[in-house]
Image: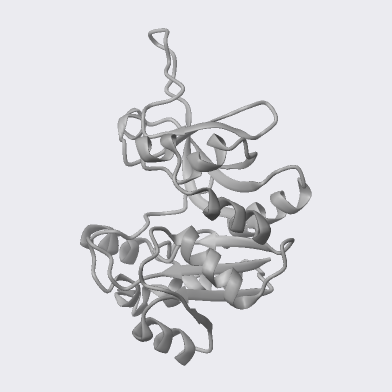
Amino acid sequence: MHVIIPARYGATRLPGKPLREVAGRPLILRVHERALASGAQRVTVATDDARIANVVEGAGGEVVMTAAGHASGTDRIAEAIALLALPDDAIIVNLQGDEPLMPPALVAAVARALNDHPQWHMATAARRMQDAQAFANPHLVKVVCAASGCALYFSRAPIPWPRDAGMPVAFLGHIGLYAYRAGFVRMFTGWGPSPLERRESLEQLRALDHGAAIGVVVTDADPGPGVDTEEDLARANALWTPP
């Protein structure tokens, strides 16, 4: 397993986000710690900014410099795969650079699930939830799975909708953690954005649009808040525990 952490400096809502501190260390290093704790054979930060690179390398981490204009973290990872000359069958975990509380065991589980299911093109994770407010929140992506364990659909809308009154609001909240083989990443980025992806602003729908199988690891673990705003950063600091 090779964890690649995409990180850019110019986040719109929280500029300089990777270098903001969580529990006294830059956010990017806290994410890097989670990746190392997962048992990954290799961890690489893919960034477009020398300030981020200097911090990671100063802590002994590996960095690959990528272009500034990537539309998504997956595009940045695709460039990193090319620069690192990784073979098509290499399993890559995309651990986003703003997830300082991601459980290392879940990182390992997603990679292991992909390795154990050669018919899957991707693997991701989802959390069992029963929270009516979260169910209605468009910022929390929901996923519905087939009996095979593969995703049928991801949506910002509340799915599956409980038609009968009194039915409990039970659903799977998607966790933005992905594993894929390097060869699939090259193919995925070559497809370009799909109609469903554009409609919901969800990159994983590109894979479903093209008939790819996305296996879902279901967990009760709480990955904690991703960091997009000052409020998220404060919550991450309040909740931070060592990996």
Nearest to the observer: residue 188 or residue 22:
188
Nearest to the observer: residue 76 or residue 171:
76
Picture layout, residue 191 above or below residue 75 = above
Where residue 225 sits in the image (x, y, percent)? 37, 54
Residue at left offset 44%, top offset 73%:
30
Where residue 211 sits in the image (x, y, percent)? 62, 35
Spot the residue most to the bottom.
58
Residue at left offset 59%, top offset 57%:
185
Q: Is residue 129 left or right of residue 227?
A: right
Q: Is residue 117 left or right of residue 239?
A: right
Picture layout, residue 229 above or below residue 41 = above
Where residue 122 sits in the image (x, y, percent)? 63, 48
Q: Is residue 33 left or right of residue 236?
A: right
Quadrant, the N terminus: bottom right
The answer to which quarter of the image holds residue 193 is: top left
Where residue 195 sits in the image (x, y, percent)? 42, 35
Picture layout, residue 199 above or below residue 53 = above
